[in-house]
Amino acid sequence: MSKIPFYIVTGFLGGGKTTFLKHFLHTFSGRYRIGVIQNEFAPGQVDGAELRREEEDFELLEINKGSAFCVCLLNDFTRSLKSFIGKYCPDILLLEASGLADPIAVAEVLQGSELFPLLYLSYIWTIVDAENFEKTDSMITRVERQVRVADKILINKTDKHPAPLDPVIKKLRTWNPFAAIEAVTFARATLDNLDELKEHEPHAIKKKEEHRRFEPLNKPGTGTVALKTTWPISRQNLENFIREMLPLSYRIKGTVKLDDGTFVSVQAVMGEVEYREAGKLMQPTELIAIGPGITPKSFGKRFHEYRKKGG
């Protein structure tokens, strides 16, 4: 069985994630077998009932006992998701993460031994509430982490935010200099061609034909790898590590702590890599890689081997 592309919708509480899901289902229902995973801390099933009223064709898995990516629920989530996949055989999976979720934990879950053969992380939308963005100071670290992992940032509820969006965009750009940004109302995003997303071209930088030079014969299935570490690395050794991983990966992205105490944002897509300074942050290194030629063990091992090298 081919691996299933896994899409994530994240964003702070009340930002419009469920509204985006309805827009997504209206756009793609009937063209794909869609599995939706909803994860909220509340024990109720309000959001699930709201989705079902849309009368679109999809299957729903609800995780409402807390974050599905908390260690205490990880085994339950893995079992539930495997059963869900076996029963419905979806073409794609779309997760509406809790507004309090840490997105890097999602990638770590997908690289687990039971899910790694089944899924790969394909694309992440992060929804930002333009109206209340400046009111989230108490949870700014959580919001920042959600923004940092995004492939596309949706600035929602712009109809309720008469002020210019420039300050919001500037702040988002300091957190994630690479993601596409779109201002929307009612979470009606311009949805990229899903076939292209499934082919790992989130920004359409390369044509599909160019993928083949990255694909060895009898290639293993595409997988997701997440690396989180507090150990710093030199700039030169980081660049050498990324250079080695490029032929094995469709995409590498994240924020890395350097040995001078600063951070650098990394974005590598289809063999092209870009680095941007991210200043000083209070967080660990977090890297996500997607590709046919890497494994969680080999990716982390090589990173730490480069980290320990001089220079």
Image (cartoon, rainbow, N blue to C red):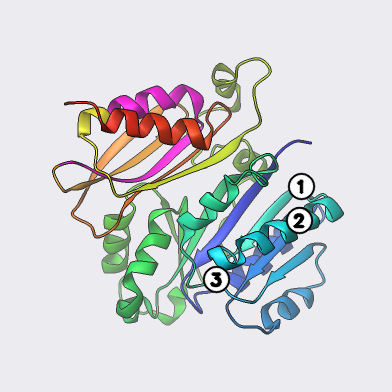
Is 248 part of what is drawn in magenta? Answer: yes
Q: Earlier in the sequence, mark 3 or mark 2?
A: 2
Q: For the C terminus, give its image quadrant.
A: top left
Tag 1 secondary structure: loop
| Left or right of 47, for residue 253 | left
Amino acid found under the numbered disc labelled 2: Ile
| Left or right of 243, for residue 150 | right
Residue range of the region highlighted in magenta in the rendering: 239-259
Disc 1 or disc 3, which is closer to the eye? 3
Disc 2 packing (10 Å; few <14; some 14–19; many ≥20)? many
Q: Is residue 294 above or below residue 34?
A: above
Are circles 1 and 2 on residues that touch, CB within 8 Å?
yes
Q: Earlier in the sequence, mark 1 or mark 2?
A: 2
Amino acid found under the numbered disc labelled 1: Asp
- Marks 1/3: CA–CA distance: 23 Å
Amino acid found under the numbered disc labelled 3: Ser
Give residue 34's mark: 2
Q: Nearer the viewer, residue 181 or 276?
A: 276
Q: Residue 280 placed where, x, y %?
A: 18, 54
Q: Is residue 119 above or below residue 73?
A: above
Tag 3 secondary structure: loop
Q: Residue at x 32, y 61 (%)?
A: 172
Give residue 98's mark: 3
Are circles 3 and 2 on residues that touch, CB within 8 Å?
no
Q: Earlier in the sequence, mark 1 or mark 3?
A: 1
Q: For the N terminus, give its image quadrant.
A: top right
Give residue 91's mark: 1
